[in-house]
Image (cartoon, grey):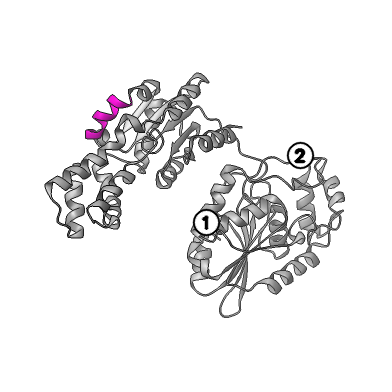
Amino acid sequence: MTLEDLQNELRHGSRVALLVRHAERPKIDPNDPSFGDALPLTYEGQRTARKLGRLLGEFRDDVQFAASPLCRTHMTAACIAEGMGLPDAEILTDGRLGNESFYYADAGEVLEVFKPNNFFTACFDYFASGEQRGFRNLYAATDAFETWIATNMRKRLFVIATHDLYVAAFLAARKAGTFSRETWVRFLDAGAIVVRPDGTRRYALVRTNLSRGIVGVYKPKISGVVFDFGGVMTTSTMPARVRACVREFGIDWAHLEQGFARYRRLMDGDFISMDEMYDLIWADADIRITDEQKARIHEEDIASFLDEYVNRTTLGWMKALKAEGYKIGILTNMSSEFARRFRKVFADFIAVADAMVISGEEKMFKPQKRIYDLLGERIGLPAEELCFVDDAEANCEGARRAGWHCIQFESNEQAERDFRTLVG
């Protein structure tokens, strides 16, 4: 079952219990008797769990959450809830979703079974026979698990953050999945119990395709780091100044937001000028504006390029990465008119870069895939070795679709920390 299949089931009135494997976490010490109890999610794990929440966001008014007590599962449930717009959601916690498992009779003995590095062999033997040293009977445990779900399910969507073995064991017992190492439950994959309005029931593995990982942490080889301009190389972005200006003129900022969504990228791609962009915005909103007001707004728009907004901390980070051997790129949505000023005011940044793509000079813009591909060609690195640093989620998603890694910039401290986590 795909996520789209799951969404359609919910849209057509089905009730769904979703047994979600937690998101990415650091590697577990094989000798840790707590099975990594205190390990948190990685940055990537938190990001993808929030994304899963956004994809399920239309069902936010009829959802509940549960998790095992382990840090990584509780964080997964919390991040999914946050992505759905429910940052204060209640999360039911039950040890039987973790180490006090429906499936484990003796967690210590289970650890001994897994210690010889035959995790998959032990799991597959358990699924085939229904018995394994340290485990409860597969079918009795699955019956108890499903009874627990039915007893606690009060909403149409029940998101239960648990562990890969439990998801796979549940589905294997219900004859809804045959597992191998290649088809194992990846991070954020899930088992679904779908109860349709007519009472029929379906069990399925849900492939979310939000993670590459099945065990441990995927550690990419990063050879190049590419930086956005506004909000990353600057300490402020244009809208803050323009917002204050239009408020002074009594213009509703919502009209500007709608207009930028429609036309800003066309300006950045040099398909229209700044004057034309603003004329379209005023015409759409039926706003009359004087030439003096128009000139002032244009001035404030361009003001994000002034020296006082240069983010010297980002410049220092770019230089440090360059000294470590990373190739540096600049990829920005910017009209050719703006680019002339950019090349002058931000010459120190440009001097560090091995490659640069400015949207207006190429007649394309983020998040179009071809603009990322063009930067990759110029910097001479494959997509999987590039990491993009951008403050806009849409541009980050465009980079990921192009095969890049991505850090969404909120602050220098956060972005540098997340990059170090990414590269290990």
Q: Which mark is residue 29?
A: 2
Q: Is residue 397 left or right of residue 258?
A: right
Amino acid type, mark 2: Asp
Res. 52 in view: yes
Q: Secondary structure at mark 2?
A: loop
Rendered position, 35 above or below 226 = below
> Furthest residue to the left?
291
Segment colored magenta: 336-346
Quadrant for the N terminus in the image: bottom right
Q: Which mark is residue 83?
A: 1
> Furthest residue to the bottom?
198
Rendered position, 296 above or below 153 = above
341 part of magenta stretch: yes
Q: Principal SS element in the magenta part? A: helix
Q: Is residue 156 left or right of residue 365?
A: right
Instruction: Name which residue lies at 14% across and 45% down.
Output: 292
> In whole angstroms, how far apart are the C-alphas of marks 1 and 2?
30 Å
Camera-nearest residue between 188 and 64 = 64
